[in-house]
Image (cartoon, rainbow, N blue to C red):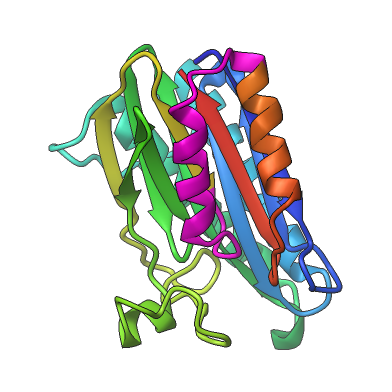
Amino acid sequence: MKGAGTFLSMGERPIQEDHVLVKEDRGLILVADGFGGSLSGLETARLANDSIVHFVGRQSQDEEATMPFELRGHLTWDANILGNAVLHANREILKWNQKRSAQARGGASVVAARVRQKHLCVCSVGNASSWLLREGESKALTHPKSLGLFEDPFMGWGKPGRQIPLLSLGTHERLEPEILEVRIEEGDWLVLHSDGVWPDVIEELGRLQRKNLEFEASLRSFEEICKLTSFNDNASISLAIF
C-alpha cells in the first residue's frame, strides 16, 4: 500500500457519528458509522474501530490472546483474524451497552479492510460499503444491508429515512459478517465509506483514477472531490492506493 487518505463530513447533521481509522503499519483501514442517543453513535463507532485494531494486534502476537475464535475453513488465516476482530468489537459494544440505559445505547455499521502484500481481506457488518477501483472501473466488494435496499434494491440507496442498517454491531449477540478476499494489483484503489456517501462519489473517483496522477496528487484530488460534494448525512470515506 502506497498510502491512504481519509475524509469526514458532518453533512447537515448536528453531530458527527462516523469514525475512520487507518493503521498503515498493520495494513488496516476501518470505517464505522455509529448511531444512538446523544454522543453514543460516535463513541460506539470509535469503540468498534479501536477494538478491531486491538484484536488484530494481540492476535498477531499470541494466537490464544483473544479467544473465543471462530475458525472458518474456507477463509485464510488473515481473513479469519479480521472476521473475528469484528466479532470481538461486537462483544465489546454489547458490554458497553449493558452499562447504559436503553436510550443511551448505541451501535455501529463497520467495514474493515486488511492488506498484506497483494492479499486484501474485507469484512462488513451493516450499512457501510467497500469498492475496488481498477483502471477507472469500480466493483462493489461487500454489500450494504439497509432497510431502503431491502425495500428497493434499485433505488433504495438514498431514500430518506431508509438508511437504517438491518444488522449492526452492538444490537445482535450473534453476527455473521460478510467477508471477502481478493488479490490486488499495482494501481488499484480501495474505497471504504459510510452510508452518507452516495455512488456518484465513486464514479467521480473512477474518473480521477483514469487520469493516472502521481500518488500525492491523487490524494489531493480525492480530498478536493470530497470537499466539493454536498453531503446530507454524516459521511466518512477512506481511499487506499496500491
Using the rendered image of the protein, determine whether residue 64 is visible from the camera's viewpoint.
Answer: no
User: Residue at 70% of width from left, 50% of height from top?
Assistant: 19
User: Residue at 60% of width from left, 64% of height from top?
Assistant: 196
Q: In the drawing, does residue 102 fall left or right of residue 132?
A: right
Query: Nearest the camera: 123 or 3?
Result: 3
Q: Is residue 237 above or below residue 177?
A: above
Q: Is residue 194 above or below residue 83?
A: below
The stretch drawn in magenta includes residue 208: yes
Query: Nearest the camera: 95 or 15?
Result: 15
Query: Nearest the camera: 240 or 30?
Result: 240
Q: In the drawing, does residue 30 fall left or right of residue 80?
A: right
Q: Position of residue 121 (x, y in %)?
A: 34, 33
**Furthest-left residue in view?**
74
Q: Position of residue 148 (x, y in %)?
A: 42, 82
Picture quarter containing residue 42?
bottom right
User: Residue at 55% of width from left, 67% of height from top?
Assistant: 170
The stretch drawn in magenta includes residue 50: no
Q: Position of residue 134 (x, y in %)?
A: 34, 29
Image: magenta residue range: 193-216
Q: Is residue 60 above or below residue 169?
A: above
